[in-house]
Image (tube, helix red, strand yellow):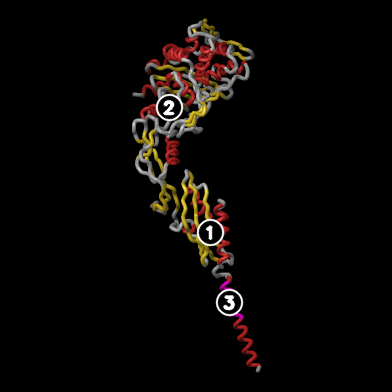
Amino acid sequence: MRTKKWLLTCGVLAVIAIVTAAIMVLRGGPDSTPAGDDVAAAVGQYLRTWSDGDDRQAGALTDDPRGAGAALAASRSGLGASAVTATLQGVSGDSARVRVKWTLGQGRVWTYDNVLTVVAGDGVPRVHFTPAAIHPELGEGDRLAVRAAATGVALVDRDGKPLLRWGAGGPEAVEPSLAPLILPGLGRLLADGGTAWAVSRVDRQGREEVLHRAGQPPAAPMTTTLSSTVQQAAQAAVDGAPGPAMLVVIQPSTGDILAVAQNARVTDGNRLTGLYAPGSTFKIATVTAALERGLARADEQLPCPATVRIGQRTIPNEDLFAFPSLPLHSAFAHSCNTTFAQLASRLPADGLAEAAGRLGLNADFTIPGITTEAGKVVPATGSADQVESAIGQGSVQASPFGLALMAATVASGESVTPQLVRDRPTTVNEGYTAPPREVIAELRTMMREVVTGGTATGLRASGTVHGKTGTAQYGDGSQANGWFVGYQGDVAFSALTLATNSSKPAVALSAAFLNRLP
């Protein structure tokens, strides 16, 4: 009996052990396959964390926390993704079907299906991570990259010369030294508007395989208004300047931006749309206000003392020069600060702002391919501000772009709408109306006299040039920038030299530019 009871007891224990082991296999032990619910929960949490943009935490939910976090972050960066949305589609055993949608910007979306596996080596269900967990065709050392799917020439200048071509990463400069301030923006415009793109797998050796392709390549290259000839002349001129210098060139008859140049001595980024005190170049606006309001005629004799006190402000001429009474056009040519300060004192508070607006300095445009700001001229806050603004100091501000636009307005006699890309029209956010014809005619005569017998005689050998010089103090007043703005034929421009304390370097820069034109 005892033998039988013992055998029966052993049999029961054996059955219990077998059943327990079976349950362990079915429900998952320390090294077992996770159950379906566990797979769904592990994958779901991983996908939610990844979609939330927390790559490091998503990596922590895998069996390779450090490697996974770095790989997920690298894929997001390499694709330039603005978002990734990953969702669970279903579970089968220890595997989960998922759908991944990358939002890559510019209306680009890449969607694909993948399969993730869940393991429980440490007793906690975790996503098994290899590069294939990101995309099924990724291997060790591979990375993802977005590519332009177009080939050939991407951008040509106004004469058909290639400026950008399609490369693996998008538009690339044919001559990197040509228009380095403008071509990157045009490249972004091409990339943003392009319909052809691809996602590639890049291995350690740099070999690429296209994983996804979308859209149609452009039918023809985009055309810019830039002139390679004018741009090269402008860049050579600023590169030859002894200090920081910049130059903007606009065609008055069309508004086409022909060139934008800045030398390497300008160390604080693109300053061509930065705002500066325009100095005596602003006398173009001051004389416009005086002529329009009938305060003086071009041939009217006006005083030009060495200094003049108006209210609480004493205005001097440069180096305290003085003239006996002289015609307004001669005071303009010799840049008599005291003459223009006295005229401005008779203007209403909004007189200068209105005249500047007629010359484009308060205009605002959205120009595809470039960000611009012309200037900022507001009504005077008092008599001191009024007389200082009359000579381009005070509160008035203008950019090299804005002053080139002002010169183009005088040259054309009409408002000018600048543009940079053919078939991508400029949006006029704040337009303007040019001064009356009779005022424009007087401005042209005065600006010519500046070159023939005034402050810009250094340009007499550069053709029929019209313009105005300017010197503008900044900071504590111990230094000043130099300007020349003007036009020759159908080429209007502004030249700015920083911290030169004189307009002469800007005049020399302008001559160097014009003398290089064909």
Circle 3: residue type? Ala
Q: How crowded is mark 1: few (under 14 residues within 10 Å), some or many (20 or more)?
A: many
Question: Within the image, what quadrant is residue 457 found in?
Answer: top left
Residue where numbered disc 2 is placed: 238
Q: What residue lies at 56% left-to-right and 16% top-to-bottom?
A: 351
- Could you tell which of marks 2 and 1 lies nearer the N-terminus? 1
Above or below 223: residue 498? above
Cα distance, mark 2 to mark 3? 84 Å
In the image, is 2 to the left or to the right of 291?
right
Instruction: In this rendered view, identify the residue nearer to me: 66 or 19.
Output: 19
What secondary structure characterizes most of the magenta part? helix
Does residue 417 appear anywhere in the picture?
yes
- Could you tell which of marks 1 and 3 lies nearer the N-terminus? 3
Q: How crowded is mark 2: few (under 14 residues within 10 Å), some or many (20 or more)?
A: many
Percent x, y of residue 283 = 51, 16
Of circles 2 and 3, the one toward us is: 3
Q: Quarter of the image for the N terminus: give it.
A: bottom right
Instruction: In this rendered view, identify the residue nearer to me: 438 or 51.
Output: 438
What is the number of the mark on residue 88? 1
Instruction: In this rendered view, identify the residue nearer to me: 377 or 512.
Output: 377
Instruction: In this rendered view, identify the residue nearer to me: 341 or 479.
Output: 341
Residue 44 lies in magenta, yes or no? no
What is the number of the mark on residue 329? none
Residue where numbered disc 3 is placed: 21
Q: What residue lies at 45% left-to-right and 32% top-to-bottom?
A: 264
Circle 1: residue type? Leu
Q: Give the range drawn in magenta.
A: 16-26
